[in-house]
């Protein structure tokens, strides 16, 4: 393996693996093909649940699943703080807008970020930046402006060109690590659909950036010693219908807390609906003992059944009385959990919520991935388990059906595509790297360990992924 001295990670936010693969095969991504794929590898990888920006960055930046970083969504509700502290900034969160600046404080401090491992790092349009040098967080103050511009205007291409300019300018300082986010694919997909011309142009724009990057590195004599990685946090699917999970709960008699109107039930909520990517929801219910404890799946069985009856809801999950993840869909019901040896256990109660064929009752984490990798729900068992480990995760977690999302109001402009769910089109992402990798079934959480290993850094024992290079 080549001895790399630095790494550049490009987050193609929202890139679908099938679109990326098709463009590669058609020759529409010539620079990515020449400088990454031909020298190294192109694979498909499984992202995390929820498959949404922010939580799905933790694999790359901390080598951890978002549930284990206590980051269960782009919006969450902390039942204990809500119950005990009326005036606290930690009662609930939405990483849309100014609250994005709380993300570094909110994420578990038990694990080192890539920026803490590589002090000479550069960060571009990424909120999860704990450990970055103030000077090198290149968009610390401007990212909010550019993300608002990207969200509310049709000029995300201009924002991606800003990311390109900062990336190329940063090379002169010889950083050890660069994390650069390109927003065009995600934003144009939300506004239009994942196969729109502007979306495809955003893939090509990243390819053009890679060409300029390679030429700049070559001029500096650093091309061969720079590890270049491109991946994504999630895919997207076109949305034809919106399910109002907020009004659904209100119609069940709950006083539901929600964003953006956090003052409506600031002190008297008995439920909360917090949406991520619009196709995933954390649902919180006040237990009969108050907000001090979570309600179990068993206690909420009636509500579970009502959600499953909705065509917009694909999967409902929660923790049962035994602490196991219970999962239900129209196809069946099952329990899944990790035993003391770290094995994934899967017990079908009725039918099979994921329609898995030949899934063993007990398997290692890698076996669970291999058995599910080519199904409609890749790695769903482990992804549900890790998410439910977070104290901030809802009592119930909803994953939307293809074509639907879970937020009917308060989205301006209207989202015509969504992400966040457990099914394949949201969970499989592209992964290109300019070195050979030694696995076929890959999780995005493996890429952190891979980058450290390729740069000669020791891989921490307490991370979730494994290195893909020898």
Image: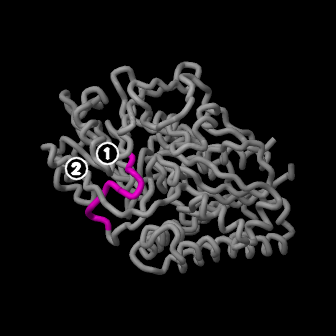
Q: Is residue 406 magenta?
A: yes
Which span is picked out in magenta? 399-411
Quarter-wise, where is residue 166 in the image?
bottom right
Nearer to me, 113 or 315: 315
- Disc on res. 77: 1
Query: Residue sitting at 61 percent across and 35 percent down?
Result: 371
Query: Residue 377: image x %, image y %?
Result: 51, 43
Q: How is the image coloured?
A: one colour
Residue 378 in the image: above or below residue 176: above
- How packed mark 1 is, by other alpha carbons closer than 10 Å (few <14, some 14-19, many 20 or more), is many
SS for tag 1?
strand
Query: Residue 357: image x %, image y %?
Result: 54, 33
Query: Residue sitting at 44 percent across and 50 percent down?
Result: 421
Residue topped by disc 2: 257
Query: Residue sitting at 68 percent across and 38 percent down?
Result: 466
Cβ atoms at labels 1 and 2 below 8 Å apart:
yes
Query: Residue 359: image x %, image y %?
Result: 55, 29
Quarter-wise, where is residue 175 in the image?
bottom right
Nearer to me, 306 or 162: 306
């Amino acid at each position: 393996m080549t001895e790399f001295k630095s790494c550049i990670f490009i987050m193609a936010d929202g890139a679908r693996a099938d679109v990326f693969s098709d463009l590669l095969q058609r020759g529409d991504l010539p620079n990515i093909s020449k400088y990454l794929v031909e020298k190294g590898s192109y694979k498909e990888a499984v992202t995390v649940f929820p498959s949404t920006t922010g939580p799905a960055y933790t694999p790359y930046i901390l080598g951890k699943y978002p549930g284990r970083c206590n980051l269960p969504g782009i919006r969450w509700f902390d039942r204990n703080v809500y119950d005990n502290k009326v005036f606290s900034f930690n009662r609930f969160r939405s990483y849309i807008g100014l609250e994005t600046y709380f993300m570094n404080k909110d994420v578990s401090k038990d694990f080192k970020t890539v920026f803490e491992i590589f002090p000479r790092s550069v960060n571009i349009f990424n909120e999860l930046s704990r450990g970055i040098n103030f000077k090198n967080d290149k968009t610390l103050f401007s990212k909010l402006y550019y993300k608002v511009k990207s969200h509310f205007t049709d000029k995300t291409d201009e924002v991606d060109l800003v990311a390109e300019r900062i990336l190329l300018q940063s090379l002169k300082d010889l950083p050890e690590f660069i994390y650069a986010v390109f927003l065009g694919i995600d934003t144009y997909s939300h506004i239009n659909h994942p196969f729109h011309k502007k979306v495809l142009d955003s893939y090509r724009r990243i390819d053009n950036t890679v060409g300029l990057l390679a030429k700049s590195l070559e001029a500096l004599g650093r091309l061969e010693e720079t590890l270049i990685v491109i991946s994504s946090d999630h895919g997207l699917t076109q949305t034809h219908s919106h399910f109002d999970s907020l009004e659904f709960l209100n119609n069940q008699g709950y006083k539901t807390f929600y964003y953006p109107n956090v003052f409506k039930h600031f002190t008297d909520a008995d439920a909360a609906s917090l949406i991520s990517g619009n196709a995933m929801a954390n649902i919180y219910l006040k237990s009969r003992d108050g907000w001090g404890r979570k309600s179990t799946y068993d206690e909420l069985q009636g509500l579970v059944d009502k959600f499953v009856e909705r065509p917009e809801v694909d999967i409902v999950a929660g923790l049962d009385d035994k602490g196991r993840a219970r999962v239900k869909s129209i196809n069946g019901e099952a329990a899944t959990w990790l035993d003391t040896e770290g094995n994934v256990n899967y017990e079908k109660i009725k039918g099979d919520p994921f329609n898995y064929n030949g899934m063993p009752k007990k398997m290692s984490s890698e076996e669970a991935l291999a058995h599910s990798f080519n199904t409609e729900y890749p790695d769903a068992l482990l992804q549900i388990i890790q998410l439910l480990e977070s104290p901030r995760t809802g009592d119930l977690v909803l994953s939307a059906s293809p074509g639907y999302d879970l937020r009917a109001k308060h989205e301006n402009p209207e989202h015509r595509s969504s992400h966040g769910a457990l099914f394949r089109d949201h969970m499989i992402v592209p992964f290109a790297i300019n070195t050979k990798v030694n696995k076929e079934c890959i999780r995005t959480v493996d890429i952190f360990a891979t980058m450290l290993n390729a740069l000669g850094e020791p891989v921490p024992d307490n991370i979730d992924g494994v290195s893909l290079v020898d």
